[in-house]
């Protein structure tokens, strides 16, 4: 089992141990670490990239209880230094956190958040209508999200052996294994790209603007 250090720290580099390194059919190498800072693709979030020793991490995926890092060269078993690329990690954390915030905003109007896709250029939150669902528009959701951002609520992580819950300040906690900003202001400005409704489903498409 790979220890997932990113569950409880925003640290981007550390020393760990290579458990195994195996060549794959596409010319890459599958590396399993004793503990990792790399978030694998999943849960609506892209994989981290970075370095394991001299090797570039091209993709990260989950395989049961293991996290498998696909690299461009082999690495030796034993202790090694790893580093997650800061730029992509920051963007993914901002988008994922923005998705949680928009999920909360939509639920105030009777829409239940059921799915999040937090990839750059295609981020969206999908909602199902409840009995109290109301019509919402871009201006309404954008204004509500902006008001919450100004409160700069801190991230809270609650984790036990069964699940990991994420919340910001007094907002409801959500079961999530992704990476998030330490406080809401770090998301930056959220831009609502469009809102689409098809029968009982509503999608809020969004992005986050570049930080100054």
Image: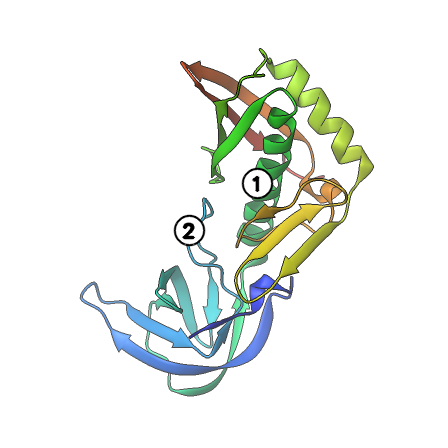
- Which residue sits at x=72%, y=21%? 143
Secondary-structure class at tag 2: loop
Q: Quadrant of the N terminus?
A: bottom left
Tell me if mark 2 has few (under 14), some (14-19) or many (20+) residues whose alpha carbon lies within 10 angstroms of its own. Answer: some
Which residue of the protein is positioned furthest toward the right in this rendering?
151
Residue at mark 1 to residue at mark 2: CA–CA distance: 14 Å
* Residue at mark 2: 42
User: With 189 as the anchor, is 19 left or right in this view?
Assistant: left
User: Tag on residue 95?
Assistant: 1
Which residue of the protein is positioned furthest toward the top in this rendering?
135
- Which residue sits at x=64%, y=45%? 173
Relative to residue 100, is residue 48 depicted above or below?
below
**Residue 61: image x %, image y %?**
37, 60
Tell me if mark 1 has few (under 14), some (14-19) or many (20+) residues whose alpha carbon lies within 10 angstroms of its own. Answer: many
Toward the viewer: 164 or 212? 164
User: With 96 as the anchor, is 126 left or right in this view?
Assistant: left
**Residue 182: image x %, image y %?**
71, 52
Which residue of the protein is positioned furthest toward the bottom in this rendering?
78
Toward the viewer: 31 or 141? 141
Q: Quadrant of the C terminus?
A: top right
Relative to residue 141, is residue 117 depicted above or below?
below
- Which residue sits at x=63%, y=64%? 8
What is the image's colouring? rainbow
Secondary-structure class at tag 1: helix
Location of residue 98 (image quadrant): top right
Toward the viewer: 26 or 62? 62
Work out whether mark 1 precedes mark 2 in sequence or the reverse, and give the earlier one. 2
User: With 70 as the anchor, is 119 left or right in this view?
Assistant: right
Relative to residue 41, is residue 82 depicted above or below?
below
């Amino acid at each position: 089992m790979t220890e997932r250090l990113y569950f409880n720290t925003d640290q981007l580099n550390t020393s760990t141990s290579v458990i195994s390194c195996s060549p794959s059919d596409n010319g890459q190498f599958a590396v399993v670490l004793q503990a990792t800072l790399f978030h694998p693709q999943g849960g609506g979030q892209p994989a981290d990239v970075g370095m394991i020793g001299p090797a570039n991490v091209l993709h990260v995926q989950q395989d049961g209880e293991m996290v498998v890092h696909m690299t461009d060269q082999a690495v030796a078993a034993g202790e090694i230094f790893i580093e997650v690329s800061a730029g992509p990690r920051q963007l993914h954390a901002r988008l994922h956190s923005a998705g949680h915030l928009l999920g909360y905003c939509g639920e105030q109007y009777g829409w239940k958040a059921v799915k999040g896709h937090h990839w750059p250029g295609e981020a969206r939150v999908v909602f199902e209508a409840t009995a109290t669902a109301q019509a919402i528009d871009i201006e309404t959701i954008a204004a509500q999200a902006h008001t919450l951002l100004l409160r700069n609520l801190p991230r809270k992580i609650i984790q036990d052996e069964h699940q990991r819950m994420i919340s910001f300040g007094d907002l409801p906690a959500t079961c999530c294994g992704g990476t998030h900003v330490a406080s809401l202001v770090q998301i930056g400005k959220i831009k609502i790209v469009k809102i689409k409704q098809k029968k009982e489903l509503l999608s809020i498409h969004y992005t986050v603007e570049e930080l100054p």
